[in-house]
Image (cartoon, rainbow, N blue to C red):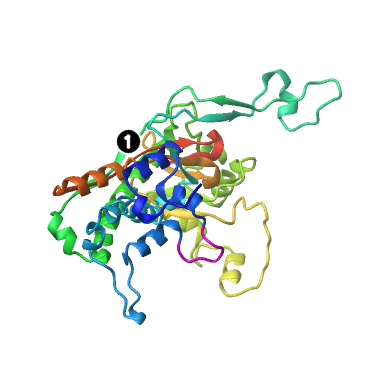
């Protein structure tokens, strides 16, 4: 594919990228691959060609351009939608809760999507499926990949910024970035709420997270202690381990009490460890010793019981994003010089495997 010069960049370039299921940045990079070790990509090189500086380098006495840099030519205007998208997406990916709940982000052309799911059950050969050996005369058990019964639901995330064309023109791009990052943070928080709902209830394809009571793990136990905690995490033995835990304030306090016991309640071994006894224990399965602990007020009680969500982040949630959903409205703002700058993105969340998440309930 030929390199796309700045003078040839327009809204049709976006449409061509979207028709191939690509963002503009990906499309430009395919047409003009960056040399190994390059600090900027193809889109960055177009910004440079347009004389647009987006970040300050104070030690070199270099400071960001104003919005005027995007508006002074038709070609530069065509860069603004992708600039907006990159700022928002990069900020969302750094949002503390969102970044630890999403395994991948997949652009798609449109807002209708049915996922494919793996079914590891095989009723005709149950023993083989249970990881026993396959006898010479038996059939090889099948793991079936089947299309989902329901489409993933898409919602619009973001906000409208009311800003005059004149204010945008005169504002430094580092200030514009702050505005966009505020919108991105709000969108990421709303997305995180939807992700937690998808983890708990599934995406409409019979993949809600299994729920286990503490009393089912340890008879008569209604609160969290070490034995309940370990037994719960070991539920992920065949699913790659649980590397992410999400809880509200009450659940979080119970977890912290288990992970960081006080000397007065700890056993002798805990006290020795706290005072610097050197003990090296390797647990390569990562089943109980390495987790990311997250707080969210959106973790609600289940049947009036505190809930703790555990998941294998790498196998749980993928975000599906309609390419161009943010771009089109930014382009409309530039063309019409309106005062409402809408920064939104259409996305939905798919649960990759059913048993990648489980929920522990406490009395």
Residue range in magenta is 34-40
Confirm whether the magenta stretch covers residue 133: no
Q: Nearer the viewer, residue 351 or 25?
A: 25
Q: How many neighbours does mark 1 have within 10 angstroms: few (below 14), some (14-19), or many (20 or more)?
A: some
Query: Dividing the picture into quarters, in which one does residue 151 lie?
Result: top left
Q: Nearer the viewer, residue 249 or 238?
A: 238
Quadrant including the C terminus = top left
Q: Single out the residue that lies furthest toward the top.
A: 124
Confirm whether the magenta stretch covers residue 36: yes
Q: What residue sits right under mark 1 in the picture?
A: 155
Q: Is residue 271 left or right of residue 192?
A: right
Q: Nearer the viewer, residue 119 or 212?
A: 119
Does 336 sit above or below residue 33?
A: above
Total labels drawn = 1
Does 281 sit above or below residue 159?
A: below
Q: Is residue 34 left or right of residue 15?
A: right
Residue 99 image position (x, y, % from top left)? 43, 52
- Secondary element type, mark 1: strand
Does 47 sit above or below residue 287?
A: below
Residue 269 image position (x, y, % from top left)? 62, 66
Does 49 sit above or below residue 356?
A: below
Residue 98 seen from this side:
yes
Q: Nearer the viewer, residue 243 or 85?
A: 85
- Residue visible at 57% across and 56% down in the picture: 290
Residue 170 image position (x, y, % from top left)? 17, 64
Residue 300 seen from this side:
no
- Magenta highlight: main SS: loop
Query: Dividing the picture into quarters, in which one does residue 17 lie?
Result: top left
Q: Single out the residue that lies furthest toward the right.
A: 136
Residue 76 image position (x, y, % from top left)? 29, 56
- Residue visible at 46% across and 58% down in the picture: 257
């Amino acid at each position: 594919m030929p390199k796309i010069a700045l003078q040839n960049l327009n809204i049709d370039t976006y449409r061509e990228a979207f028709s191939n299921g690509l963002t503009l940045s990906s499309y430009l990079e395919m047409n003009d691959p960056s040399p190994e070790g390059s600090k900027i990509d193809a889109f960055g090189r177009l910004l440079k060609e347009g004389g647009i500086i987006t970040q300050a380098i104070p030690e070199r006495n270099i400071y960001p351009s104003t919005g005027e840099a995007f508006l002074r030519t038709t070609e530069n205007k065509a860069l603004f939608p992708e600039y907006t998208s990159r700022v928002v997406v990069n900020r969302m990916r750094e949002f503390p809760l969102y970044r630890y709940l999403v395994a991948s982000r997949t652009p798609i052309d449109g807002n209708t999507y049915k996922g494919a799911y793996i079914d590891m059950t095989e009723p005709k050969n149950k023993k083989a499926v249970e990881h026993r050996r396959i006898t010479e005369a038996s059939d090889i058990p099948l793991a079936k990949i089947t299309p989902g019964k329901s489409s993933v639901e898409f919602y619009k995330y973001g906000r409208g910024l009311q800003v005059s064309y004149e204010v945008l023109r005169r504002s430094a791009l580092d200030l514009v970035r702050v505005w966009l990052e505020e919108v991105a943070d709000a969108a990421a928080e709303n997305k995180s709420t939807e992700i937690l709902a998808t983890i708990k209830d599934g995406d409409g394809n019979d993949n809600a997270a299994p729920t286990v009571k503490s009393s089912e793990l340890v008879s008569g136990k209604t609160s969290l202690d070490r034995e309940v905690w370990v037994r719960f995490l070991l539920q992920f033995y065949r699913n790659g381990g649980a590397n992410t835990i999400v809880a509200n304030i009450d659940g979080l306090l119970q977890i912290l009490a288990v992970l960081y016991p006080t000397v007065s309640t700890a056993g002798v071994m805990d006290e020795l460890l706290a005072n610097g006894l050197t003990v090296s224990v390797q647990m390569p399965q990562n089943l109980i010793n390495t987790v990311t602990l997250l707080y969210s007020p959106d973790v609600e009680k289940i049947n009036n019981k505190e809930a703790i969500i555990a998941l294998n982040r790498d196998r749980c949630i993928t975000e599906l994003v309609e390419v161009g959903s943010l771009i089109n409205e930014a382009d409309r703002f530039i063309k019409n010089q309106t005062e409402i700058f809408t920064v939104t993105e259409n996305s939905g969340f798919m649960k990759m495997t059913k048993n990648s998440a489980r929920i522990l309930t406490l009395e």
